[in-house]
Image: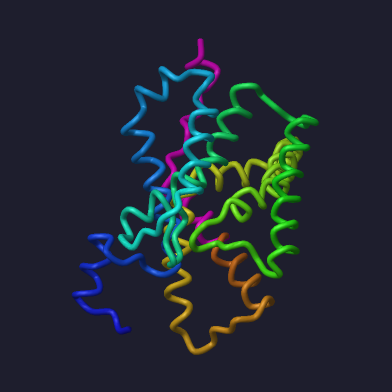
Amino acid sequence: MPLNQYRIMEMLLIRRLAGWSEFILSFAGVLLLVLAFHTLMKKAGNKLPYVIGAIALVACLIPFRVSEPLVALFVGQADFPVFAVLPYSLYFAGGILFAQKDLRFNIKCLLISLAGGAYFVIIYIVSGGMPSRFPLSLAYLVGGMPLVYLYYLLARWLAKFKLSSVLQTIGANALFYLLLHNIFIFTIRGVPFFRSTMQFTVIIFIIIMCMIYYLQKLITPKKPQVTEKEGL
């Protein structure tokens, strides 16, 4: 379908979710929820990750379908691509818990993550296919737990090296990178030399990330250096 004023209005009013941009809206949805319930979240204290985790599981198990994109953005029980805020907040809850308790390698966390991965594999074998992603199934939601936990441990290990400063910069400006990355992707898809191959994808990914990193450095104000006389 060609891009016209009606389609643009549909996307601006979130009556239609633009392809490749679902995650950006979900990112904004998380920020909106945190802003709206900031006071309640502070009052919950150490119970917050458990409350969010329970809400995430309930949202994932809702037995009805949603056709309204704005509602689906949060609930996720839809037949079209959407990264639902509430169900995927299960990992947000896990991040809060890890930060509160400063968890690193933990045998209980390892077993829970492996249980999530095992449930995914069991459903895959029994059903003879991938667990449902749209609408989101519990198996698909928890199936990524082992990879997320491995990613977390890898990130902590990489923090010991100088290269981690580059990765920290990207992580601290995730939304900025996501927005510009999508803009570059939309632009590149329209050029004649675009190819849907792994080699082309990796090369373009590296080029785009380097360009965004350079742009981010240009707009980031440098910290003023304090001389010895000024310090005294």
Count all numbered tags in the image, as a single digit. Answer: 0
Instruction: Please provide percent x and percent y for residue 165.
Output: 63, 41
Instruction: Please provide percent x and percent y for residue 121.
Output: 74, 57
Q: 34 above or below 214?
A: above
In the rendered image, which quarter contains the N terminus? bottom left
Q: Which residue is farthest top? A: 232
Report the magenta stretch's main SS: helix
Q: Magenta span has 144?
A: no
The structure residue drawn at horizontal position 42% and vertical position 40%, both measured from the top left corner, is: 221
Tell me, what colour scheme is on the image? rainbow
- Whether residue 122 sits left or right of residue 86 in the image: it is right
Out of 17 and 222, give the one closest to the viewer: 17
Out of 51 and 122, give the one closest to the viewer: 122
Out of 188 and 131, give the one closest to the viewer: 131
Q: Which residue is farthest right? A: 107
Q: 115 above or below 11?
A: above
Instruction: Please provide percent x and percent y for residue 218.
Output: 45, 51
The structure residue drawn at horizontal position 67% and vertical position 76%, both measured from the top left corner, is: 198
The structure residue drawn at horizontal position 58% and vertical position 67%, both measured from the top left corner, is: 207
Instruction: Please provide percent x and percent y for residue 195.
Output: 58, 84
- Whether residue 153 sits left or right of residue 48 in the image: it is right
Q: Magenta span has 229?
A: yes
- Location of residue 159 (image quadrant): top right
Q: 161 above or below 4?
A: above
The region drawn magenta spans: 210-232
Q: Which residue is farthest bottom? A: 192
Out of 25 and 172, give the one closest to the viewer: 25
- Location of residue 158 (image quadrant): top right
